[in-house]
Amino acid sequence: MAIDVKEKNNLITIQLNGSFDVSQYEKFKSICEGYKSPEYKFEIDFKNTVYMDSSALGMLLLLREQTKGDKEKVQLINVSGTVLRILEMAHFNQLFNVETVD
């Protein structure tokens, strides 16, 4: 799986492609560590993500911790299918703003 990153006006968009799982841990962590300043906001784009595992949930929690739990700092966008069900089962829709795809 590839992770693509775009930065525009302190908004960091991280696009996940394929499966978001333990094999992306190091790359995802290093991306997040590169944007530790409080002015950064994150969009995690799940448009091309078909699956995520429990380690992916942990990665999202690490990003949430980095942003001090501010729901306005981390948006999960283009969420659908299996990924949406996993996030809902883990109650991540209460921890993050989740934008679904119709």
Image: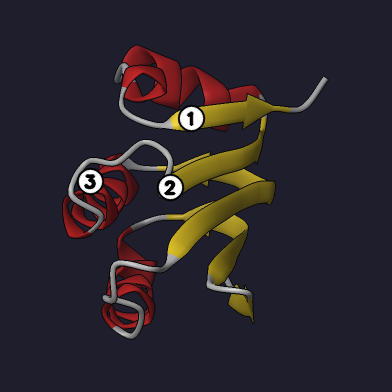
Vertical placement of residue 62 versus 28, above or below: above
Name the amino acid type tagged 2.
Val
Image point 29% across, 20% down: which residue?
90
Q: What residue is shown with label 2?
A: 74
Q: Quadrant of residue 92?
A: top left
Q: Earlier in the sequence, mark 2 or mark 1?
A: 2
**What's the CA distance linking mark 2 and mark 1?**
7 Å
Dot 3: element:
helix
Name the amino acid type tagged 1.
Asn
Q: Which mark's residue is nearer the viewer, 2 or 3?
A: 2
19 and 26: which one is in front? 26
Q: Earlier in the sequence, mark 1 or mark 3?
A: 3
Q: Position of residue 69 (x, y in %)?
A: 22, 41
> Which numbered marker is on residue 61?
3
Name the amino acid type tagged 3.
Leu
Image point 63% across, 47% down: which residue?
46
Dot 2: element:
strand
Vertical placement of residue 49 versus 18, above or below: above
Q: What residue is shown with label 1?
A: 97
Left or right: residue 97 compared with residue 11: left
Q: Quadrant of residue 43?
A: bottom right
